[in-house]
């Protein structure tokens, strides 16, 4: 027979773990987006204007 106290404890631990995974995925996504913007190369037309 299933002990409902253990099920509730397990569900409590599970939602915290799922939330942690979700937060880490969002952080990694934001960091990648930020690094992409920072390191993005300028288009060729803008590079030529800067050199003149």
Image (cartoon, rainbow, N blue to C red):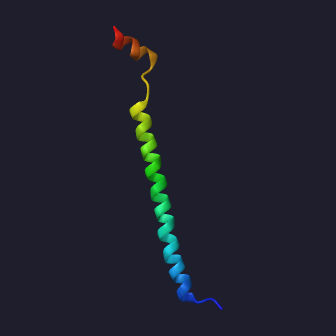
Q: On screen, 31 above or below 51?
A: below
Image coordinates of residue 15 in percent, x first then y, are: 50, 70
Query: Which residue occupies 39% across, 17% down?
Result: 46
Residue at 46% x, 52% y is: 26
In the image as oriented, which residue stretches furthest toward the top? Answer: 52
Q: Relative to residue 16, is residue 1 depicted above or below?
A: below
| Depth order, front residue of 14/46 | 14
Location of residue 3 in the rendering, given as x and y in whole percent from the top left corner: 58, 90
In the displayed structure, 32 sits above or below 21; it is above
Quadrant placement of the C terminus: top left
Could you tell whether 43 is left or right of 5 in the image? Answer: left
Count the marks. 0
In this image, 46 relative to 7: left or right?
left
- Rendered image quadrant of residue 31: top left
- Above or below residue 48? Residue 24 is below
Q: Residue furthest bottom?
A: 1
Give x and y (percent) for residue 21. 50, 60
Q: Position of residue 13 (x, y in %)?
A: 49, 74
Question: Which residue is found at the position 41% from the left and 31% from the top?
Answer: 39
Q: Quadrant of residue 6?
A: bottom right
Q: Residue at x 66, y 92 (%)?
A: 1
């Amino acid at each position: 027979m299933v002990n409902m106290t253990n099920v509730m404890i397990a569900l409590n631990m599970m939602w915290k773990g799922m939330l942690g995974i979700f937060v880490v995925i969002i952080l990694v996504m934001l960091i990648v987006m930020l690094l992409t913007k920072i390191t993005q190369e300028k288009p060729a037309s803008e590079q030529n204007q800067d050199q003149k």
